[in-house]
């Protein structure tokens, strides 16, 4: 059942990618470096689907069945794959804890770079295949995934900062920095006063 569903999804996506590749010789040339390579793509939820991405003659073939051992694999939920399409950072997207990569990571990175670099209006293409309503829902889904990814990165950064300040004590807290800055200002003021007194004493010695 899932193989039939995978096949029905693979055909339109494959057609979209290859149509854009024909209009983008630069990306097609980049793809040539991975000629004959195979990557297993697994969607873990909400429905488990497995497809194989095969590079053939500067084109991409998506198959539901592949006899052989792929060079690499990537596994994630549908929302994480949507985030892969929407993310501005390849590192954040591919090496997220929600994405599992196996085998040749350079192959995964290379294929993602080529596909993500294609100027594909997914909403426009999917509308002609799946209809406007389903496409709108998919577009909203991608937008939510992008917002979630940004919020998640901000949360992680906040947690790391808190850990460095409060737990590991590797960085001073804001109050400690403010206190240190105030002490520096106080020390500078004292040095200015000492310097002024020294100058006054020097002037008196010169007068005598």
Image (tube, rainbow, N blue to C red):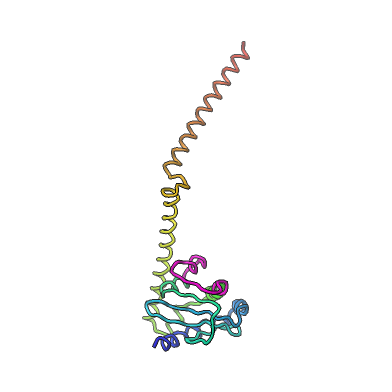
What is the magenta range? 86-108
- The percent position of residue 145, horizontal first and vertical second, equals 41, 69
- The percent position of residue 87, horizontal first and vertical second, equals 48, 68
Q: Nearer the viewer, residue 103 or 187?
A: 103
Q: Nearer the viewer, residue 23 or 68?
A: 68
Is 154 included in the stretch rendered in magenta? no
Q: Nearer the viewer, residue 133 or 58?
A: 58
Q: Is residue 184 above or below residue 202?
A: below
Q: Is residue 5 above or below residue 99?
A: below
Residue depicted at x 42% and y 89%: 4
| Residue at the extreme top | 208
Residue depicted at x 46% and y 66%: 96
Quadrant of residue 205 within the rendered picture: top right
| Residue at the extreme front | 69
Is 90 included in the stretch rendered in magenta? yes
- The percent position of residue 146, horizontal first and vertical second, equals 43, 68
Quadrant of residue 34 within the rendered picture: bottom right
Residue depicted at x 39% and y 73%: 141
Total numbered circles: 0
In the rendered view of the protein, which quadrant contains the C terminus? Answer: top right
Q: Is residue 199 above or below residue 38?
A: above
- The percent position of residue 183, horizontal first and vertical second, equals 47, 34
In the rendered view of the protein, which quadrant contains the N terminus? Answer: bottom left
């Amino acid at each position: 059942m899932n193989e039939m569903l995978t096949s029905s999804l693979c055909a339109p996506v494959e057609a979209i990618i290859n149509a854009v590749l024909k209009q983008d010789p630069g990306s097609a040339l980049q793809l040539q470096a991975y000629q004959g390579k195979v990557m297993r793509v697994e969607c873990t939820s909400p429905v488990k689907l497995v497809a194989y991405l095969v590079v053939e003659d500067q084109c991409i073939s998506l198959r539901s069945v592949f006899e052989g051992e792929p060079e690499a694999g990537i596994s994630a939920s549908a929302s994480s794959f949507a985030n892969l399409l929407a993310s501005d950072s390849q590192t954040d997207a591919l090496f997220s804890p929600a994405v599992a990569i196996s085998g040749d990571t350079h192959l995964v990175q290379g294929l993602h770079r080529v596909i993500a670099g294609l100027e594909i209006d997914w909403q426009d293409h999917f509308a002609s295949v799946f209809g406007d309503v389903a496409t709108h829902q998919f577009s909203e889904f991608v937008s939510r995934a992008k917002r979630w990814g940004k919020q998640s990165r901000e949360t992680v950064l906040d947690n790391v900062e808190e850990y460095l300040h409060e737990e590991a004590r590797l960085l001073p807290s804001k109050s400690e920095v403010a206190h240190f800055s105030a002490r520096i200002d106080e020390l500078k003021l004292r040095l200015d006063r000492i310097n002024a007194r020294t100058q006054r004493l020097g002037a008196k010695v010169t007068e005598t």
